[in-house]
Amino acid sequence: MKHGKKYNENIKLVDRAKLYDPQEALETAVKTATAKFDETVEVHIRLGVDSRHADQQVRGAVVLPNGTGKTVRVAVFAKGDQAKAAEEAGADVVGAEELVAKIQGENFMDFDVAIAAPNMMGLVGRLGKILGPRGLMPSPKAGTVTPDVAKAVNEAKAGKIEYRLDKTNIIHCPIGKASFGPEKLGENFSTLLDAVVRAKPAAAKGQYIRSCVIATTMGPGIRINPLKVSTNA
């Protein structure tokens, strides 16, 4: 695979044979963020579980202390007082039957997070094939099915992210922008890892965190010592 000139220059900053401490990895990642836009810093964590088994699923949500650096558009499925509360909390789109119809009929997807009041799930369930593949289906585990929709909107706007295993037993999550600097990114990283460690399934055996890699949008991957991650978290 051929890479551009900047990537080839940035990869010289990374020791590919080294397992970095988390903070050193973040400092290096920030140095590799040389694109003309503010690159996102992502974490990729391989876990010692088998996502094919229901008792080894790892999924949840956490509010990053310094946010994600991204403006989050929130859609809320609610009626009455809950709809009003969602609007007052700053939801971008609020509705019930008409919102479901708009998504089904017009392919309206102008939102990043979907939240639903519990009494709306019978209605929202019709959107499973549309929202599910996009990772937007409201879920109690992610805190996006809740009677307190205003709190959920506030958390989403403040930088709440969802983490979940993919089919290869890896969690992929953004932890902020390169412009945050190593200190704020480190706080976000610690918060995410703490949540992932606390979500360890009882059925998981052996080493839980097998590998951890940090990378910016356009930069090379930087490997972190998984033992340091466990200690850090």
Image (cartoon, rainbow, N blue to C red):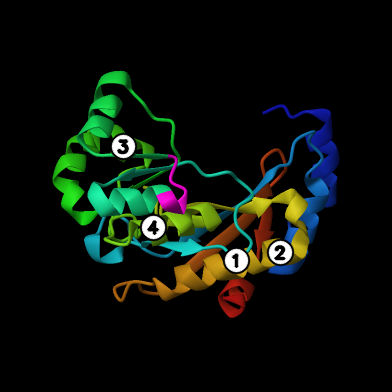
Q: Is-magenta flag for residue 40?
A: no
Give the residue type at disc 4.
Ala
Q: Which residue is mark 1?
A: 65
Label 3 or label 1, whichever comes before in sequence order:
1
- Residue found at x 32% / y 56%: 51
- Residue 16 vs residue 111: left or right? right
Q: CA distance from mark 4 to mark 3?
A: 21 Å
Query: What segment carries the magenta color?
Result: 88-92
Label 3 or label 2, whichever comes before in sequence order:
3
| SS assignment at label 3 | helix
Q: Which residue is mark 2?
A: 184
Q: Position of residue 210 (x, y in %)?
A: 51, 65
- Residue 197 vs residue 94: left or right? right
Name the one closer to the observer, 185 or 18.
185
| SS assignment at label 2 | helix
Give the residue type at disc 1.
Pro
Give the residue type at disc 3.
Leu
